[in-house]
Every structure is written in structure tokens, then in C-alpha cells.
Image (tube, rainbow, N blue to C red):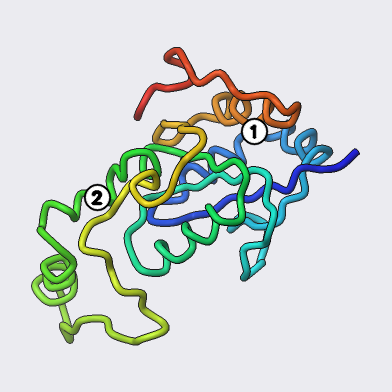
Amino acid sequence: MNKIKFATVWLAGCSGCHMSFLDMDEWLIELAKYVDVVYSPVGCDLKEYPEDVDVCLVEGGVANEDNLELIRLVRKRTKTLISFGDCAVTANVPAMRNMLGGSEPVLKRGYLELADETPQLPNEPGIVPELLDRVLPVHEVIPVDIFMPGCPPDAARIRATIEPLLKGESPKMEGRAMIKFG
């Protein structure tokens, strides 16, 4: 049996979606029979997103240049991309900074106005990624195949989304249990 090349990506979010993924508990052992995890912040230390990924769950909004570069690469190299959680679907909490009107006011507020000691803007090219002017949901940057809302989506919803894909079928993303936000 050929295993599905499976990945997860964490952009601008809290990691709650990945924690919910781990809440699938014993089903993760079953899942391991059908997938090879080829990239993930959970349990892998791979630095380069691979070619020919079958399914990828993307958590978080697109908030900085590193996120933007990664999500474009992920789309290019992934067959089925799932917007995983409310931050990926709508930009949710990370997008609250959009109300400040750009990256400059965000940085000034966070690093100068609210600093207790030695206020300074972070600036280390190649280490600190440049913020985008707005945090964007994933679908505003690249095409998304499946939207899985939830903050975070619970383990049952994650499983109900992934399980049909293992059989070459599309998940039924309908009804409160599958599409409720929050």
C-alpha cells in the first residue's frame, strides 16, 4: 500500500489546531498506517517543505514575509491543501493587528510604546521576518481546497476531514459539526 504524503504547517496562530490534532489520541496510531508525515512542527524537525505532498493542513494566518514564502511553496508542492482552523480560514485573532493600520503602527505599539526597558524595534535581516501590512487568511494568498473552521477544530472534526481523504474521497464539509466557527 502506498502511503499518503502528509504535512502540517504552522503560520501565524497559537498552535491550538495542532494541539487538537494530537487530541485524536489512539486514532493517530491508525492514521500512521496510511500516511507518511513528511513535514510538520509536531514531531518532525524537517527544515525544507518537500515536493509532491498529498495532503497538508495549514494552521494560522499569513502575517509576515516568511509565512508568505512558505504558503506559496506549500501550495506549489501540495495536491490537497486544507485551511486548518479559524486563523487560516479568516485570519481571526492574528488579524486583530489589522485595525492598527499597517505594520509600522503595530511594531511601534508593541516594541516602543509598551516597552518596559530598552524600547527598540526588532530589525535583524534574515532572522526577524518583515511583517506584512495586514494579516491575511490563507485563501487570500493561494487557492485552498478544503476549509476546516474551528478555534480550534476538535479532534472529531479533524478526523472526519482527514479520514475520507485516505480513501480518495472528499470530506463532507457541511452541518454544524463540520463548519461551525469558534
| Left or right position of 64 against 98 | right
Judge from the rendering whether residue 56 lies leftward or rightward of residue 5; answer left or right: left
- At label 1, counting other C-alpha atoms closer than 10 Å, the crowd grade (few under 14, some 14-19, many 20 or more) is some
Q: Position of residue 29 (x, y in %)?
A: 78, 38
Q: Position of residue 17 (x, y in %)?
A: 49, 42
**Relative height, residue 79 to residue 39 (above, below):** above
Q: Residue at x 42, y 14 (%)?
A: 176
Gap in angstroms between the C-alphas marked 2 and 1: 28 Å
Which residue occupies the extreme right position in the image?
Answer: 1
Q: Is residue 159 left or right of residue 168?
A: left
Q: Amino acid at mark 2?
A: Ala
Q: Which of the pair 53/113 is nearer the observer? A: 53
Residue at position x 10%, y 59% in the image: 101
Quarter residue 1 falls in: top right
Q: Secondary structure at mark 1?
A: loop
Q: Disc number at residue 24?
A: 1
Label 2: state its secondary structure.
Answer: helix
Q: Where 160 falls versus 87 (above or below)?
A: above
Mark 1 residue type: Met
Labelled disc at residue 95? 2
Determine contact: label 2, label 1, CB under 8 Å.
no
Q: Residue furthest top?
A: 175
Judged left or right of residue 142, residue 77 is right
Viewport quadrant of the C terminus: top left
Q: Position of residue 99 (x, y in %)?
A: 12, 52
